């Protein structure tokens, strides 16, 4: 989880520097690290980059259905894994041409939601024993 939070801080710095594609990518990474931390914590580690699939696996593993807002956040953030980094994804230009401050701010906000939800779920699971 510490790595998730540090990655989120790095995304915020990228946002302030105007590196919006990187802020979006790092928001994805922060959410991915949080989901994987929880999966490791419950003894069900998983590989992969799709937040949608990690979330589904987490729900299956814990029996806890994620709220719609978290499902939405994971769907949006999953789209930032590849397109934010590779110029050959785009027919013209580079990733930095395609992302805005607004998208970066939204991505960071969505990652924050996922991280808060993961932290709350972890506390709840600890209470259940």
Image (tube, rainbow, N blue to C red):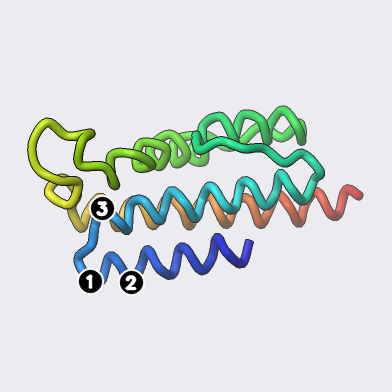
Q: In terms of depth relative to the viewer, which is nearer, 103 or 45? A: 45
Q: Is residue 27 left or right of residue 67?
A: left
Instruction: Find out whether the residues at labels 1 and 2 contact each other: C-beta distance under 8 Å.
Output: yes
Nearer the N terminus, badge 3 or badge 2? Answer: 2
Picture mark count: 3
Q: Quadrant of residue 16?
A: bottom left
Q: Secondary structure at mark 2?
A: helix
Q: Is residue 60 left or right of residue 1?
A: right
Name the residue rendered at 52%, 41% in the picture.
Answer: 70
Q: In terms of depth relative to the viewer, which is nearer, 85 or 18? A: 85
Q: CA distance from mark 3 to mark 1?
A: 11 Å
Q: Residues within 10 Å of mark 1 (few under 14, many from 20)?
A: few
Which residue was labeled with disc 1?
17
Measured along the vertical axis of the image, is residue 127 above or below residue 56?
below
Q: Residues within 10 Å of mark 3 (few under 14, many from 20)?
A: many
Which residue was labeled with disc 2?
13
Which quadrant: the N terminus?
bottom right
Q: CA distance from mark 1 to mark 2?
A: 6 Å
Q: Is residue 53 left or right of residue 63?
A: left
Residue 72's spot in the image, x, y percent? 44, 35
Residue that extends furthest to the right in the rendered view of this protein: 129
Residue that extends furthest to the front in the rendered view of this protein: 88
Q: In terms of depth relative to the viewer, which is nearer, 122 or 51? A: 51
């Amino acid at each position: 989880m510490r790595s998730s939070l540090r990655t989120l801080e790095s995304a915020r710095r990228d946002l302030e520097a105007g590196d919006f594609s990187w802020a979006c990518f790092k928001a994805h990474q922060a959410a991915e690290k949080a989901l994987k931390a929880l999966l490791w914590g419950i003894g069900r580690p998983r590989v992969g980059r799709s937040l949608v699939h990690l979330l589904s696996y987490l729900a299956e593993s814990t029996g806890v259905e994620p709220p719609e807002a978290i499902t939405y956040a994971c769907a949006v953030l999953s789209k930032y894994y590849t397109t934010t980094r590779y110029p050959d994804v785009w027919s013209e230009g580079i990733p930095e041409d395609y992302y805005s401050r607004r998208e970066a701010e939204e991505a960071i906000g969505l990652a924050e939601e996922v991280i808060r939800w993961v932290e709350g779920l972890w506390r709840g699971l600890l209470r259940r024993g």
